[in-house]
Image (cartoon, helix red, strand yellow):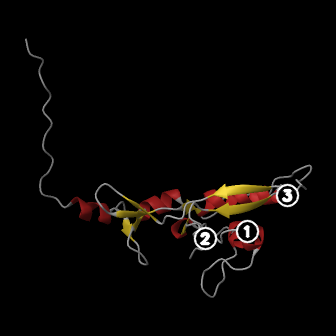
Amino acid sequence: MEEPQARVPNLNVGVDMSFIKQLFGIAPTAETDGEGYIPSPLGRLLGVDSKSGYKPADFSGTYSGDKRVLVLCTQERYLQMTNGKKFSTGHNVQETAVPLMHLRDAGFGFDVVTPTGAPAILEDWSVPKKDAAVLSFMNPDPENGQVAGGALDQTLTGSVNMGWRL
């Protein structure tokens, strides 16, 4: 005797799902300054904190040696998806800056490198816009939005500058 098979209804009723996704803010958003897509407005609203929660740790002693931490980053801005579209990728600003800030606070210096020597890519949509500690660490130049001469540049002496725009 054959097992009964469940019938799955065909829900394709000719509705343009991209319109529905856009209406509810769940569709990836085309970049205004590039050729890729960034997370949806809903994804950014729910997934990007305006503040990182960074608090300086109280270290009983800090590192005073001359060894530095090597930080390997990607230089790729886009990841091509199976549908051929490009999704903006790189490093989340909070996920990159906060660990580096703790290393700095513990007395470590670090060198940021990429496999090709090109600048590391940070996701500008992931900037915690109300986080003074992270913004100060990244120290964007208000004239052009590029990292300029602040804590991060001083920490990156002789290594790749992490160029990014707000």
Q: CA distance from mark 2 to mark 3?
A: 26 Å
Q: Nearer the viewer, residue 155 or 60?
A: 155
In the image, farthest residue toward the left: 1
Report the mark closest to the observer, 1 or 3: 1
Q: Nearer the viewer, residue 14 or 34?
A: 34
Look at 69% across and 58% down and name the residue there: 98
In the image, farthest residue toward the bottom: 143
Quadrant in the picture for the C terminus = bottom right
Report the mark closest to the observer, 1 or 2: 1
Residue 129 circle label: 2
Dot 3: what SS? loop
Is residue 14 visible to the viewer in this orientation of the structure?
A: yes
Residue 50 circle label: none
The amino acid type of the residue labelled 1 equals Leu
What residue is disc 3 on? Answer: 107
Dot 1: what SS? loop
Is residue 166 visible to the viewer in this orientation of the structure?
A: no
Q: Is residue 96 left or right of residue 121?
A: right
In the image, farthest residue toward the top: 1
What residue is disc 1 on? Answer: 156
Look at 43% across and 61% down and name the residue there: 42
> Which label's residue is closer to the chain start, 2 or 3?
3
Q: Is residue 108 left or right of residue 90?
A: right
Q: Nearer the viewer, residue 165 or 153?
A: 153
Q: CA distance from mark 1 to mark 3?
A: 14 Å
Q: Position of residue 29 (x, y in %)?
A: 38, 68
Q: Quadrant of residue 105?
A: bottom right
Q: Position of residue 165 (x, y in %)?
A: 56, 76
